[in-house]
Amino acid sequence: MKILVTGAAGFIGSNFVYLMLEQHPDYEIVGLDLLTYAGNLETLEEAMKNPKFKFTKGDIADRDYIFNLFKEEKFDIVVNFAAESHVDRSIEDPGIFLRTNILGTQVLMDACREYGIKRYHQVSTDEVYGDLPLDRPDLFFTEETPIHTSSPYSASKAAADLLVLAYHRTFGLPVSITRCSNNYGPYHFPEKLIPLIISRALADESLPVYGTGENVRDWLYVKDHCIAIDKVIHDGKVGEVYNVGGHNERTNLEVVKTILHELGKPESLITYVGDRKGHDMRYAIDPTKISNELGWLPTVKFDDGIKMTIKWYLDNQDWWKNIISGDYKNYYEKMYSNR
Ligand code: NAD
Ligand code: TYD
């Protein structure tokens, strides 16, 4: 079996590469990544030592490059993680989100049609469902919840999902989609809430909380997401969508306070800043389908996963300090200085 993993130098893609090398030592894995600001080859250093893994730098929206790669490699399965993934950046500059997330998906699926494939898997997000109100804790996203997006990021992911389902219906492409809730764990880029708070708290810097901090996210440890994708690409039904999440809802303020408590840092570091435009209130996944059909259940509870994650950031300071010492400084200044 030969698998193409796009976005392999990013947060979830790299964790997936490591899971596949561990779970399927006989598979050949090709990791593809454009190495944008979010991609980091250091993350794949260990994988590079494995003869079953190979890295290639390239753009999923570059048709000639992708078609040549497919012609040479003859993949059995494609798992598409490659994306622009940060909501705040999509508010500043939507164009690149449409190019990578929608057109890139199209190019990959066109190559699958041309060269044949057993499965094309699209890694999507619960953000395609929009948000839920805070005063209705009985409501959850199911696979039947209407698509109703809030940000240019989620709109681009929803557009890609619709295209994936259309390629299945029209061309018979064997596709599957997972829509997962917020992930956390090793190799998470420090522009996202949890690694941003850990890295800034360790430096005793102010911790920006948007609005009132009451927004709720449903947190899933990244390895559990990767295990779910592994199950879906092997045993999931073609043409189907599977929601992935584990009932680990927390308000942003609860997340920040938990991290401060674990690090022994004062809550006085918390600084309330202007809210995100169109900020989704609550995400919460109903994972009944994947649990009933494929026997997937999360293995890590938030209270344990956050401790494991903090330990990883303490043990791997070079990894994130390299990132926050470069262009990231300008990014932080631009996004947070006048908030
Ligand atoms: P990430 O930003 O950490 O990684 C994305 C990777 O894609 C980066 O390595 C980047 O260099 C690469 N990339 C960007 N544009 C590319 C292009 N044109 N061609 C090739 N590579 C390109 O994101 P992530 O958090 O690992 O998310 C991976 C996928 O999972 C995304 O599709 C995202 O929508 C989805 N997802 C993320 C979460 C989450 O909580 N992070 C939750 C659900 C779904
Ligand atoms: P984020 O990690 O960007 O993920 P997403 O927007 O995909 O859910 O943000 C998680 C939550 O944390 C979201 O409600 C926005 C909030 N947030 C802050 O309060 N401060 C920050 O500096 C960041 C990056 C996010």
Image (cartoon, rainbow, N blue to C red):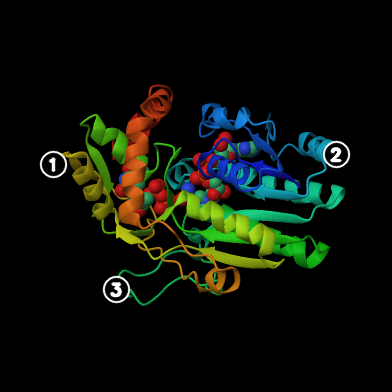
Which one is earlier in the sequence, the residue at label 1 or at label 3?
Answer: 3
Q: Which residue is pictured at 65% across the width and 42% down the height?
A: 6
Q: Disc 1 vs disc 3: Cβ atoms closer than 8 Å?
A: no
Q: CA distance from mark 2 to mark 1?
A: 57 Å
Q: Quadrant of ligand 1?
A: top right
User: Distance of mark 1 from mark 3, alpha carbons?
Assistant: 28 Å
Disc marking residue 71: 2
Q: Are marks 3 and 2 in contact (CB under 8 Å)?
A: no
For disc 1, the marked residue is 268
Secondary structure beneath label 3: loop
Give percent across and percent down for residue 94: 53, 44
Q: Is residue 22 left or right of residue 53?
A: left
Amino acid identity at mark 2: Lys
Amino acid at the residue labelled 1: Ser
Along the viewing direction, whichever of 205 and 255 lies nearer the viewer: 255
Across and down, in percent, residue 297 comes to 48, 65
Front residue of 152 and 138: 138
Q: Which residue is mark 3?
A: 135
Which is nearer the N-term, disc 2 or disc 1? 2
Answer yes or no: disc 1 within 8 Å of ligand 2.
no
For mark 2, give the secondary structure. helix
Local crowd size for mark 3, using a 10 Å CA cut-off: few (<14), some (14–19), many (≥20):
few
Spatial CA distance of label 3 from label 2 is 52 Å
Determine the residue positioned at 40% across, 75% down. 139
Badge 1: residue crowd in 10 Å (few <14, some 14–19, many ≥20): few
